[in-house]
């Protein structure tokens, strides 16, 4: 066998390999001998079929199998000998002309092919004990708890029928309506007994505001336009009219925050409600703190590990992001000009984000591999159970989906692995706590999630 490296440019390599026909013939012959004891042919006793006869019947298929196995074994040996970690699948080029293929399958010519690969670079990990990471901490105050309970009360407030007077902002109006576009009714454009809280933003823009001043039993023609990003493409951007009748108008009542209110929520007392609200806020603040610390650590890892990311992986990550961005913009009707940028500038920015994500992914993988960090089956099972709990009544469907879908299970395993690696590095790093306000903790949360 002869191996010649024909390309060595950065992370890209290409090899030309030649395997003598005699080697292939020997391997194929060994397979035919093995086949002799397994195959059953009419006219021959078990194990007594001549190899020459087997070669006439199965020779081409056995040679094809031998070639595939030889290419796989040879490539693996080349990569292992050179310590290569592949960034993607190897690209193999073989003769395609009919006569060349025929000679190869007949064992009359050498196997000659090229294999092109892109490799993962060698990564020199930083000294994590030299890392300093600031951990923002917020204590849950009594005022935070009171505000949370007030929001719960506002969402649970009672409504009482108005005996006189028209609808005002904040009132709940029960309506029936018939919608038309250019005088024609459309699917989903009618409704009976629909409750609308004026000002809640439940309906398309302009609809709720036109209910202000309507009286019980009154019918109005409401004129609105569907948003350009409306989910139904046939309705998006279309002007419509809704013949709307108010059948009931209710004014919001006051909710007294006391033990009785707590009992309506399934809790024993107001004190128990406050405890539950404090626990929820504590968990919410802890989650935000975790995100801040993780982002700070990822920034530190990014700064400390500068290397060329495999272009194919960056391109793949960029395409996933870009396709999502384009789909979102098409759905919303926005343009790059609306975002004070251009398509070229946006592509450049998202390419940088893709490059960062790929490099960080490789660094985290290297840390995990060198420190034998793994995700157990129990950890994955707990994650599946948690997903199932999020869709009550469909738990078995979720469980079966993950059990039969290896790719989905891998997507579930990936964030668990990442978090375990992050925790490992944080154990070594110098983490200091810093008291901050709630506003500081949640500042720029969306932007951080996009760039991470």
Image: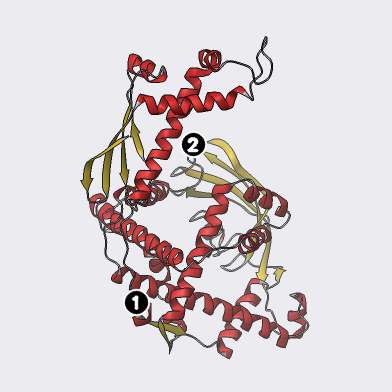
- Label 1 residue SS: loop
Q: Nearer the viewer, residue 294 or 166?
A: 294
Q: Earlier in the sequence, mark 1 or mark 2?
A: 1
Quadrant in which residue 108 is drawn = top left
In the image, taking residue 425 as reference, residue 96 lies left or right, namely left
Residue 99 screen position, x and y as percent:
34, 14
Q: Nearer the viewer, residue 89 or 110?
A: 110
Q: Nearer the viewer, residue 316 or 207?
A: 316
**Residue designated by label 1:** 127
Residue 78 screen position, x and y as percent:
34, 44
The way the protein has been coloured in the rendering is: secondary structure
Quadrant in which the C terminus is drawn: bottom left
* Residue 66 badge: none
Q: Mark 1 against mark 2, which lies toward the viewer? A: 1
In the image, taking residue 117 as reference, residue 66 lies left or right, namely right
Question: Which residue is painted at 49% across and 66% down in the image?
Answer: 372
Quadrant in which the N terminus is drawn: top left
Question: Which residue is painted at 34% across and 37% down in the image?
Answer: 91
Question: Which residue is painted at 55% across and 40% down in the image?
Answer: 180
Quadrant in which residue 388 is drawn = bottom right
**Residue designated by label 2:** 182
| Vertical arrangement, residue 282 with respect to residue 162, above or below | below
Q: CA distance from mark 1 to mark 2?
A: 69 Å
Marks 1 and 2 in Cβ contact (< 8 Å): no
Q: Residues within 10 Å of mark 1 (few under 14, many from 20)?
A: few
| Vertical arrangement, residue 228 with respect to residue 263, above or below | above
Residue 160 screen position, x and y as percent:
72, 70
| Vertical arrangement, residue 90 with respect to residue 161, above or below | above
Q: Residues within 10 Å of mark 2 (few under 14, many from 20)?
A: few
């Amino acid at each position: 066998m002869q191996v010649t490296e024909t390309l060595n440019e950065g992370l890209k390599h290409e090899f030309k390999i030649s395997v003598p026909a005699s080697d292939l013939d020997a391997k194929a012959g060994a397979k035919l001998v093995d086949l002799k004891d397994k195959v059953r042919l009419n006219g021959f006793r078990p194990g007594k079929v001549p190899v020459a006869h087997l070669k006439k019947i199965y020779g081409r298929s056995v040679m094809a199998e031998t070639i595939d196995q030889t290419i796989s074994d040879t490539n693996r040996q080349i990569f292992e000998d050179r310590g290569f970690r592949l960034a993607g699948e190897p690209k193999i080029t073989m003769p395609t002309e009919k006569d060349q293929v025929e000679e190869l399958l007949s064992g009359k010519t050498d196997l000659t092919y090229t294999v092109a690969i892109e490799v993962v670079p060698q990564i020199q990990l930083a000294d994590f004990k030299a890392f300093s990471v600031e951990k923002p901490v917020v204590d849950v105050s009594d005022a935070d708890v009171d505000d949370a309970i007030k929001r719960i009360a506002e969402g649970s407030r009672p409504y009482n029928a108005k005996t006189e007077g028209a609808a005002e902002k904040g009132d709940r109006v029960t309506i029936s309506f018939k919608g038309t576009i250019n005088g024609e009714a459309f699917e989903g454009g009618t409704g009976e007994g629909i409750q609308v809280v004026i000002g809640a933003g439940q309906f398309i823009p302009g609809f709720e505001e036109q209910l202000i001043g309507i009286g019980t039993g009154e019918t109005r023609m409401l004129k609105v336009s569907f948003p350009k990003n409306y989910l139904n493409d046939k309705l998006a951007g279309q002007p419509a009219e809704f013949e709307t009748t108010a059948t009931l108008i209710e004014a919001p009542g006051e909710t007294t925050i006391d033990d009785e209110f707590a009992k309506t929520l399934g809790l024993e007392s107001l004190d128990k409600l406050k405890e539950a609200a404090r626990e929820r806020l504590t968990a919410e603040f802890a989650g935000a703190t975790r995100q801040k610390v993780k982002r700070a650590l990822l920034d530190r890892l990014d700064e400390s590990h500068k290397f060329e990311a495999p272009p194919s992986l960056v391109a793949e990550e960029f395409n996933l992001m870009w396709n999502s961005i384009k789909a979102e913009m098409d759905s919303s009707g926005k343009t790059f000009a609306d975002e004070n940028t251009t398509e070229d500038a946006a592509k450049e920015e998202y390419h940088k984000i893709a490059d960062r994500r790929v490099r960080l992914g490789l660094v985290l993988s290297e840390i995990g591999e060198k420190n034998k960090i793994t995700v157990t089956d129990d950890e994955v099972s707990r994650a599946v159970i948690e997903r199932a709990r999020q869709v009550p009544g469909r738990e078995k469907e979720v469980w079966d989906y993950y059990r039969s879908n290896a790719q989905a299970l891998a997507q579930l395993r990936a964030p668990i692995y990442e978090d375990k690696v992050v925790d490992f590095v944080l154990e070594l790093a110098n983490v200091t706590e810093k008291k901050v306000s709630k506003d500081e903790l949640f500042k720029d949360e969306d932007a951080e999630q996009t760039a991470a």
